[in-house]
Image: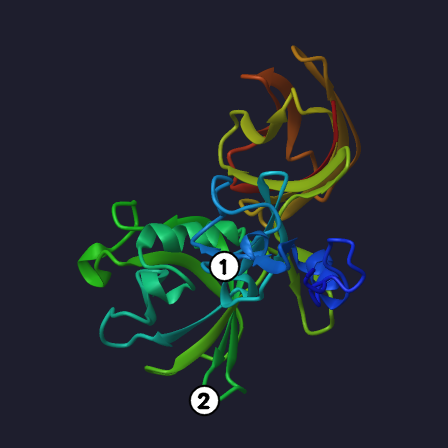
């Protein structure tokens, strides 16, 4: 007597079909049929978990892996794991919660000391050491222009915005880190308040870290950039210097390997004169790697004679703009440079 075909093989062709076939095609589960015995092998559809990216030596093609430290989801194909999806997390959302310190530098707190804001190491998502906290901020692109937005946990109308004004993340052993007061388990950040309320004593804050942005906006929506502006082959920047002698003073310099030429607009203020005197003008500068030449024009001054003269040269692979004052009066020289790359 011949046994009837298995329900998994309705047409009797020796291969599973129907709903089970669709399951196989959709999940990587392996089905086999022998002697009317159906074997379901899930080794091709297993979910793995790891702290960090999975190793190619683990799992089989078709498997999934979840990195529980950050929510990355990987799929294995052709012997290698590839990232194909991410799960939103506080780490990725750039958020954490911390209490403003007014008494002790303890876990879960932050506070101001000697011009720096110190945050406890485990305040940042997924961090248990100072090194991990520093690495976490680095992964977020922490630098000048990054902003920290503080919203009070039990009073959401209390919001303060602070901007990073020094990209250094201070840890124990670094110059400027005050371990005698805050201990060794914090990171120190240089932040400048832009707007909002003052911190309340022992209040808890929800803190968001923004992408670096060096634009400042006033109440009318006008924007001010606090860094150099680069557009393809062109850079716009400023420089400032002072002098109270008649010796040449370097006002600005730039790498000759990077920029070939520049246009300057300048403004000089002589506060040593009575009344104050002013001078404005423009100049063009070009170099050949060894020597620099310039041409001044549009010079206007309020006194009886120019406040000084400009010169250019190449020194230590930099093209320099230098100013020699006509007197030893206290002067401030401000320049705006528009330079074009080599």
Q: Residue furthest left?
A: 180
Q: Residues within 10 Å of mark 2 (few under 14, many from 20)?
A: few
Question: Looking at the image, which is closer to me, 274 or 294?
Answer: 294
Measured from the top left, where is residue 3 in percent x and y? 68, 62
Query: Up-down: is 308 above or below 199?
Result: above
**Quadrant into which the N terminus falls:** bottom right
Q: Residue at x 67, y 69 (%)?
A: 218
Residue at 50%, 50% in the rendered image: 139
Q: Is residue 274 left or right of residue 232?
A: left
Q: Nearer the viewer, residue 48 or 107?
A: 48
Residue found at the far front of this picture: 1
Where in the figure is residue 282, as x and y percent of width and height? 76, 35
Which residue occupies 72% across, 37% down? 235
Q: Earlier in the sequence, mark 1 or mark 2?
A: 1
Please say if 255 is above or below 201: above
Q: Position of residue 77 (x, y in %)?
A: 63, 43
* Disc 1/disc 2 C-alpha distance (Å): 28 Å
Q: Secondary structure at mark 1?
A: loop
Q: Quadrant of residue 81?
A: top right
Mark 2, secondary structure of its residue: loop
Viewport quadrant of the C terminus: top right
User: Which callout, 1 or 2, points to the residue nearer the camera?
Assistant: 1
Residue 165 visible, this angle: yes
Q: Quadrant of residue 11?
A: bottom right
Badge number at residue 26: none
Q: Which residue is mark 2?
A: 154
Q: Is residue 334 visible?
A: no
Q: Residue furthest top?
A: 290
Q: Position of residue 9 (x, y in %)?
A: 74, 61
Horizontal side, residue 277 vs residue 102: left or right? right
Q: Which mark is residue 70?
A: 1
- The number of discs equals 2
């Amino acid at each position: 007597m011949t046994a009837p075909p298995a329900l998994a093989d309705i047409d009797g062709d020796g291969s599973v079909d129907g709903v089970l076939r669709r399951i196989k095609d959709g999940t990587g589960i392996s089905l086999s049929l022998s002697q009317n015995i159906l074997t379901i092998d899930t080794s091709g559809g297993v979910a793995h978990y790891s702290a960090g990216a999975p190793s190619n030596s683990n799992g089989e093609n078709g498997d999934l892996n979840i990195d529980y430290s950050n929510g990355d989801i990987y799929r294995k194909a052709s012997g290698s794991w590839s990232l194909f999806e991410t799960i939103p997390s506080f780490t990725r959302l750039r958020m954490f919660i911390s209490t403003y310190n007014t008494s002790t530098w303890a876990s879960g707190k932050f506070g101001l000391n000697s011009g720096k804001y110190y945050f406890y190491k485990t305040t940042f998502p997924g961090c248990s050491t100072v090194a991990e906290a520093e690495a976490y901020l680095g992964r977020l692109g922490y630098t000048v222009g990054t902003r920290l937005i503080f919203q009070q946990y039990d009073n959401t109308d209390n919001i303060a915005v602070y901007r990073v004004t020094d990209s250094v993340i201070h840890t124990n052993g670094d110059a400027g880190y005050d371990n005698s007061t805050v201990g060794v388990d914090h990171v120190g950040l240089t932040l400048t308040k832009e707007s909002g309320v003052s911190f309340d004593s022992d209040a808890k804050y929800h803190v968001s870290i923004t992408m670096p942005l060096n634009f400042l906006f006033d109440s009318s929506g006008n924007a001010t950039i606090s860094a150099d502006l680069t557009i393809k082959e062109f850079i716009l920047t400023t420089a400032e210097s002072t002098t109270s002698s008649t010796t040449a003073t370097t006002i600005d310099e730039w790498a000759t390997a990077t920029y070939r030429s520049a246009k300057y607009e300048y403004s000089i203020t002589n506060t040593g004169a009575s009344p104050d005197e002013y001078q404005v003008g423009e100049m063009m500068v070009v170099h050949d790697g060894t020597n620099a030449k310039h041409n001044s024009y549009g010079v206007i001054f309020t006194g009886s004679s120019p406040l000084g003269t400009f010169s250019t040269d190449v020194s230590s692979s930099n093209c320099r703009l230098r100013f020699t004052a006509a007197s030893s009066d206290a002067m401030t020289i401000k320049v705006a440079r528009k330079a074009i790359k080599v």
